[in-house]
């Protein structure tokens, strides 16, 4: 029963890129309203895990469920419509659309209430409002990241996946993105955050999962990690 | 004087028809990355469908609407029943669409016979317009007008509607478009039907100029390929401009240097591929 009330449950997910076996039975659980930081070295399988949840890579084995609903075999657009939205690595905003259009194509209202709208996204990122008629391709990296987050929120997600939102951004912008994530989290959204920025991730996280060579190496509460940093650093090595 | 003036108008009319043909081809290629080699056949089907509709008693305007809608349905079936199963397999799509266009031309041969079937210019456009001592064939002006109106409607559809934004998002990054909830399947069918509709409309509207004849499909397909390569794949403005450039080159080439008509036609394409592979306006490499 515990699995049914969790926002997202992965059970022994295996995934491949061609013939190379990348995920070797990843299991993790994201509880409702919490932020789970997914950490690991480069190539450990963090992005692959995110891609599997979003349906952009088909898991070969194992199950993925959101609030009890199996997502495993759904096409990405139906996973998105079911309520999983993605802030992808590298932002991947639509460069030939305006800022407003980037948000519009992702808009989805939900029967259970739709807290997010153009107005709320512009409130979260006033810079996007200033530039709403501008081509998204001409935005700075930080603004593109804000747009990628806003675009995901326009779908009124039940689960938000964020893959390295701080990547390639100046420290000031990282702090701004961090504040935005904190605010989104306060609204009760369930979030998986993949980060190379260990400090940012730990500041925001409730739970921590470390992946190493395609397997879960550590899983625990962020409090425990904050109290005893070695818990995680021994699995990450690089920090 | 009369020669230049008539050939100029012919060039514009051909350009307009090429735009009707090529805009759909470019749209389909930009979104689905499919080189739809049935596009010439869809144009020819439009011409023959207009023939049948006019034999049933409809005027050209209504016949063109019927032809466009019928060809749109055919396009939708091709996408759903054949291309859908070949997604990601570019070679398979090329071969399948080529095979389908052969089947379509045989089908036309069986149903409408091998003789050229002229399509009557509507009576109201038969008399030439006289203006400042010059004589203009009225129907060619009408064709240019239709192309310009269709071009504007397409532009507004692409730039001012949510559907247009969804299509452009798909052209930018199809995988990400799906990840924001855009239904790829419905979008592909819509765009393919729209492209087929425009080709069918072109075939019918072009009827009084080209007539309906076996071989119309391959004549038009090669022109469409040249237009989209010159204009840039996925660029509506580029397709529009390139359609008229090719309209002029082809018309004047065949009139002035008939022996070199194909050299004059294909040379700009070769030059563009060699020196500007994205076309004059496009962003996607051919």
Image (tube, coloured by chain):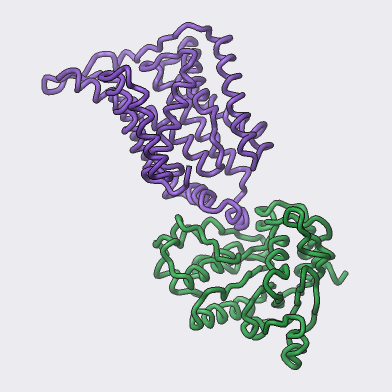
Q: Residue furthest left?
A: B132
Identify which residue is drawn at 80% across, 79% down.
A218
B149 versus A181 height, above or below: above
The N terminus of chain A lies in which quarter of the figure?
A: bottom right
Identify which residue is drawn at 60% across, 62% down.
A155
Q: Colour of chain A?
A: green
Residue A13 in picture, x, y percent from top left: 81, 62
Residue A185 in picture, x, y percent from top left: 64, 77
Residue A128 in picture, x, y percent from top left: 45, 69
**Chain coloured purple: which letter?**
B
B139 versus A124 height, above or below: above
- Camera sees residue B185: yes
Q: Residue furthest bottom?
A: A227
Q: Is residue A159 left or right of residue B244?
A: right
B170 versus B109 height, above or below: below
Would you identify the image quadrant in which residue B93 lies?
Answer: top right
């Amino acid at each position: 029963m515990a699995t049914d009330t969790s926002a997202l449950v992965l059970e022994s997910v295996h995934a491949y890129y061609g013939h190379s076996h990348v995920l070797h039975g990843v299991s993790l659980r994201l509880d409702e309203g919490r932020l789970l930081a997914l950490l690991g070295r480069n190539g450990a399988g963090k992005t692959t895990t995110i891609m599997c949840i979003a349906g952009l890579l088909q898991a070969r084995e194992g199950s993925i469920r959101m609030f009890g609903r199996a997502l495993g075999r759904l096409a990405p657009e139906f996973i998105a419509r079911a309520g999983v939205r993605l802030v992808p690595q590298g932002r991947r905003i639509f460069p030939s659309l305006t800022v407003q259009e980037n948000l519009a194509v992702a808009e989805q209202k939900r029967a259970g209430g739709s807290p997010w709208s153009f107005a709320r996204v512009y409130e979260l990122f006033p810079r996007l409002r200033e530039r709403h008629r501008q081509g998204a391709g001409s935005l700075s990296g930080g603004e593109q990241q804000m747009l990628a987050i806003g675009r995901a929120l326009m779908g009124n997600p039940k689960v938000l996946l964020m893959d390295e939102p701080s990547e390639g951004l100046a420290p000031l912008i990282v702090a701004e993105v961090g504040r935005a994530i904190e605010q989104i989290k306060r609204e009760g959204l369930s979030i998986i955050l993949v980060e190379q920025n260990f400090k940012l991730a730990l500041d925001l996280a409730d739970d921590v999962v470390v992946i190493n060579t395609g397997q879960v190496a550590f899983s625990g509460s962020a409090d425990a990690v904050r109290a005893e940093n070695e818990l995680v650093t021994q699995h990450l090595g690089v920090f | 004087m009369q020669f230049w003036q008539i050939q100029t108008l012919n060039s514009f009319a051909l350009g307009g028809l090429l735009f009707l043909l090529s805009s759909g081809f470019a749209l389909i290629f930009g979104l689905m990355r499919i080189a739809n080699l049935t596009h010439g056949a869809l144009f020819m089907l439009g011409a023959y469908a207009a023939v049948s509709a006019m034999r049933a008693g409809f005027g050209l305007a209504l016949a063109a609407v019927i032809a466009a809608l019928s060809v749109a349905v055919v396009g939708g079936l091709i996408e759903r029943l054949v291309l859908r199963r070949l997604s990601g397999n570019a070679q398979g799509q090329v071969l399948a669409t080529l095979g389908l266009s052969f089947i379509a031309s045989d089908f036309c041969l069986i149903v409408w016979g091998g003789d050229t079937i002229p399509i009557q210019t509507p009576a109201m456009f038969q008399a030439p317009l006289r203006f400042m001592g010059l004589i203009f064939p009225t129907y060619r002006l009408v064709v240019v007008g239709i192309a310009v109106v269709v071009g504007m409607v397409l532009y507004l559809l692409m730039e001012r509607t949510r559907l247009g934004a969804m299509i452009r998002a798909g052209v930018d990054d199809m995988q990400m478009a799906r990840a924001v909830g855009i239904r790829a399947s419905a979008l592909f069918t819509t765009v393919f039907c729209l492209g087929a509709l425009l080709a069918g409309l072109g075939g019918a509207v072009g009827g009084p100029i080209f007539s309906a004849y076996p071989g119309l499909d391959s004549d038009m397909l090669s022109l469409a390929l040249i237009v989209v390569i010159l204009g840039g794949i996925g660029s509506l403005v580029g397709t529009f401009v390139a359609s008229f450039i090719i309209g002029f080159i082809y018309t004047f080439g065949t009139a002035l240097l008939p022996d070199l008509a194909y050299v004059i036609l294909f040379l700009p394409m070769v030059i563009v591929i060699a020196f500007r592979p994205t076309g004059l306006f496009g962003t996607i490499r051919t």
